[in-house]
Amino acid sequence: MSNKFDVIVVGAGPAGTSCAYECAKAGLNVIHIERGEYPGSKNVMGGVLYRQQMEEIIPEFWKEAPIERPVIEQRLMMLDKESAVTIGYKGLEFGREPYNAFTVLRAKFDQWFANKAVEQGSLLITETVVLEVIVEDGRAIGVRTDRPDGEIYADVVVLADGVNSLLGKQLGFHKEFRPDEVALAVMEVINLPSERIEERFNLEPNQGCTYEIFGDATNGILGTAFIYTNKESINIGVGTMLSGMIREKLRPHDLLDQLKKHPMIRPLIKGGEPQEYLAHLIPEGGYRSIPKMVGNGVLVIGDAAQFVNAIHREGSNMAMTSGRLAAETIVLAKQAGDFSENMLDSYRMKVMESFIGKDLKKYEDIHHFERAPQYFKEYLPGINRAASEFFTVDGTPKRDKQKKMLSHMMQGKGKLQVFNDFYKAWKVMK
Ligand SMILES: Cc1cc2nc3c(=O)[nH]c(=O)nc-3n(C[C@H](O)[C@H](O)[C@H](O)COP(=O)(O)OP(=O)(O)OC[C@H]3O[C@@H](n4cnc5c(N)ncnc54)[C@H](O)[C@@H]3O)c2cc1C
């Protein structure tokens, strides 16, 4: 093996593999380095993979990729102690080609995807940690790994090393992330026979559904819990901003235990066999936390660049698109024989012009909700009480009921304050 390549890609998650795949397909000499025993062995995801961005890399991938179920229903659950207000959408069109999204198990999916990059000619090496990026005269020229004689050189190094990218930090591209820039998530994979999943979630075989759960699931702090259906298992998890967990002295596994015991959730997972327990950080700092993503001979993609849209639960798709855009830029740089920051900066521009930059910019004020606990701690239980009032038939005239519902929702606050809170929330989301 020669130790000089066109491209070194660090990390075999969806970002790194997309980039390795596209670069190898374009005929570049790619080495793809992963510290895990195999791609996916160190990766954690609730499990919803979006069709569009994956298909831009491998058309009709679902015909051979290890997917679990096409997602045909998505529910949002506002959970209180003993109640839940649920809204959602179920559409049979999502169960037919070309599909919208799938549940996947990353340990299987990432391996399959990385092997597709190998088929294109990428050289995958696993169980290898990249210790540092080698920089000479202000330009990245390779990486040093933990293998004996482990220096590898390339024209360009792509950092796809995930959230809290140590390599990006070493290059001075970002500082240590603050606790209000990352969420800590824990999840469990619980085995259940497929027929039971289908009965409990009102599904046919080869149909899946997702629940995003707010409110009591996170003790009212900013974050969500989730339940996703696989073929013969359920992923259940909860994630909140690290800052909220520290402030409220919460332990993530306590939140997950509490969620599993909640009377609205318990029947869904009853009798299941816990198979796996996983914990991981999610970069949720949004637009204002995007680090420097281009340098001389180096590009940063995926979670390492903080590309996660927490409101829409999108991360893997942003990882894939950023990997693809990085590859497009590298191919042009190779043709020009120029790997300077100036040349590679077109990657940054492409990202900012894509849905990644636009969506992260749209929600750049998301941290308002972290500083304003009243939404989840007060208004959300108020909505539950108002719904209970609405559905209770007790002879109260409807006009009086409406007044009661409004007073539940206002939670004893003045009209001005309620207006102010909802105006601010609207401004964040608009
Ligand atoms: C609990 C949870 C639920 C989620 N749910 C969803 C969801 O439903 N849908 C969705 O789209 N997104 C979801 N996400 C986000 C999604 O998982 C990430 O956005 C996505 O995995 C990012 O891909 P990536 O390739 O950038 O990083 P990763 O998938 O983290 O891959 C980084 C890789 O780099 C390797 N690596 C790191 N450092 C080194 C090194 N020094 N040397 C060699 N290898 C290294 C790691 O082992 C890893 O394999 C979720 C995340 C979590 C934690």
Image (cartoon, grey):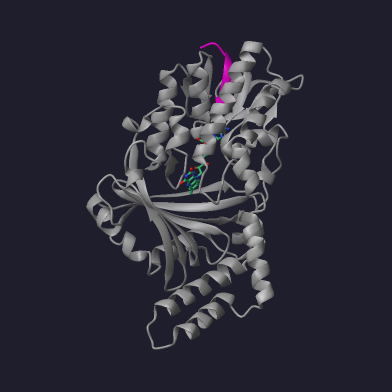
Work out whether 367 lies above or below 406: above
Q: Residue at x 49, y 85 (%)?
A: 400
Q: Quadrant of residue 264?
A: bottom left
Residue 345: x and y in percent read: 69, 26
| Residue range highlighted in magenta | 1-9
Residue 253: x and y in percent read: 48, 59
Q: Quadrant of residue 361?
A: top right
Question: Of 103 and 282, which appears nearest the observer?
Answer: 103
Work out whether 182 lies above or below 120: below
Q: Is residue 379 part of the magenta span, yes or no?
A: no
Quick check: can you spot residue 154?
no
Q: Residue at x 56, y 25 (%)?
A: 9
Q: Is residue 8 part of the magenta span, yes or no?
A: yes
Q: Residue furthest left?
A: 195
Q: Residue at x 32, y 31 (%)?
A: 63
Our reading of the magenta stretch's main secondary structure is strand
Quick check: can you spot residue 77?
yes
Question: Of 36 and 262, which appears nearest the observer?
Answer: 262
Work out whether 357 lies above or below 268: above
Work out whether 48 lies above or below 37: below
